[in-house]
Image (cartoon, rainbow, N blue to C red):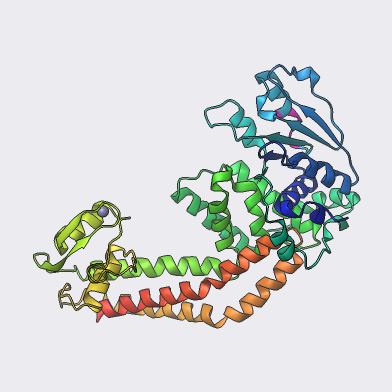
Amino acid sequence: MSLRRKHKEREDAVSAALLSLVSGKDIVFIGPEGTGKENIVEDVCTALGGRAGRYTISPSTGKEELPAGGDALILDDVFKANSGAMNAIADMMNFGKICGSSADVPSEADEAYSLYDRFAIRAFIGPLCSDEAFLSAVNGKKDDAPLEKIPAADVEKARNAAAGIPADDDVLETILSLRDGFKDSGKYVSDNRWKDSLYVLKVAAAAAGDKSVSISYIPLLQHMLCDSPEEKDEVRRAIFSVCTPGGLELNGLYAESEELLRLAVESKGAVDESAGFPRMIHCYDCNSSFPSLKRLKEHSISRPRHTYADPHAAAGGSQDYIKYTYEGLVTLLSSKYGWDLFKKSDGPDKEGFLSEAKELMKRKKALDDSHESDRSKLTEDMERNFWLTEQDRKDILTMFSLRSAELAEIGSLIADVEYILE
Ligand SMILES: [Zn+2]
């Protein structure tokens, strides 16, 4: 019986537990009672030829009571430990033997949070969903679950090999880009966690017989970088959006096109600032109204993230609520509705902007052209990577198929730049 068939609705937790036992990095399971989360570790341990010990922690557990454990030690209610026991547990960590289990993530103010933070791998488990039939339909096709093909004897070999396994350049670039993105959104990931995470990827690649960490291992970061069940979907999406071939380039291209449009609008000095709008403009985010470009521009400078409604669509009762950035709106108003917003003089950088727009268009075209070959490469890489779950593969492909729409949007951003500069 394969592990994944037995726990088919818990495939990602099985992957996380395997990663933990193979890499030697400790794992914590977060989820309500009765979800059978510890059974997964017991089973994974058995599959690798070991045995898991088990102990329930209470606030009165003394550090001398903690068992030495077998191949893995499951500690239920691990965050209920008192200070002394917590220190003892921390001392036992980093050999991949500790598997914590808890109903909740401790709050950041709580002393237990620093123990939580020491678990390199986290698995969040919800209550059993009743969609088992659906999952087995999605999942039931093949049950070759090559996971059990990792003999326990090979674990040591994989760990040793990991030290000599390099990460591909695009993997490092992707990590830098994720780090920037998390920073922008206010999510903190410590240098240590990044280091542990990359190490886990190396062991995963070594265990699969790969000579380097390729981009197809990036999705596994979902097991290391989520801090709470609430942020799991968002973090997973952020990771998946950069793990497809060209994904990083696409994100960069998008940001650069937006920036170029912003600069192009700015260079036109936009504007006859005294000119009033023929219709009032409304801000989606704060409900303010603007009778003139001058007022709108001031608002966009003080509230750069606010977005605006198309005044004609809104007046027509359209349900098509597209939210425009300042630059997007100004371009729309002048290109679609002929509002006279730009001074007719050329900005000093016109030629520079136009050649940059041309360059961006070229890069967009390259992504268009490689779309099909990228898709087959992605599918192939994912099939080979047995650490991924069926759901991972499905979600990554879905993400990839959104690429056409994003490319079209990039195309229209670049076209807007050209329009503005005309
Ligand atoms: Zn506003």
**Taking 232 as reference, is 250 above or below it?**
below
Whether residue 99 is visible to the viewer of this picture, yes or no, is yes
Give how far across and how far down residue 372 sits, in percent: 61, 81
| Residue range highlighted in magenta | 90-94
Which image quarter is the N terminus in? bottom right
- Whether residue 213 is visible to the viewer of this picture, yes or no, is no
Q: Residue at x 8, y 65 (%)?
A: 274
Does residue 183 show up magenta in the picture? no
Question: From the viewer's perspective, is residue 250 above or below residue 224?
Answer: below
Q: Position of residue 153 (x, y in %)?
A: 91, 50
Q: Is residue 389 left or right of residue 181?
A: right
185 or 329: nearer the eye?
329
Q: In this view, does 389 lie above or below 65?
A: below
Q: Quadrant of residue 284?
A: bottom left
In the image, 81 versus 10, the foreground residue is 10
On the image, which quarter does residue 204 sit in?
A: bottom right
Magenta segment, prevailing SS (helix, strand or loop): helix
Residue at the location (59% across, 46% down)? 226
- 14 or 352: which is nearer to us? 14
In the rendered view, would you say 111 is above or below 163? above
Question: How many marks are shown on the rendered structure?
Answer: 0
Q: Give residue 361's position: percent from left, percent from top.
A: 42, 79
* Picture quarter with the C terminus: bottom left
Q: Residue furthest left?
A: 274
Q: Would you say 42 lies left or right of 400 here? A: right
Q: Does the magenta stretch include residue 91?
A: yes
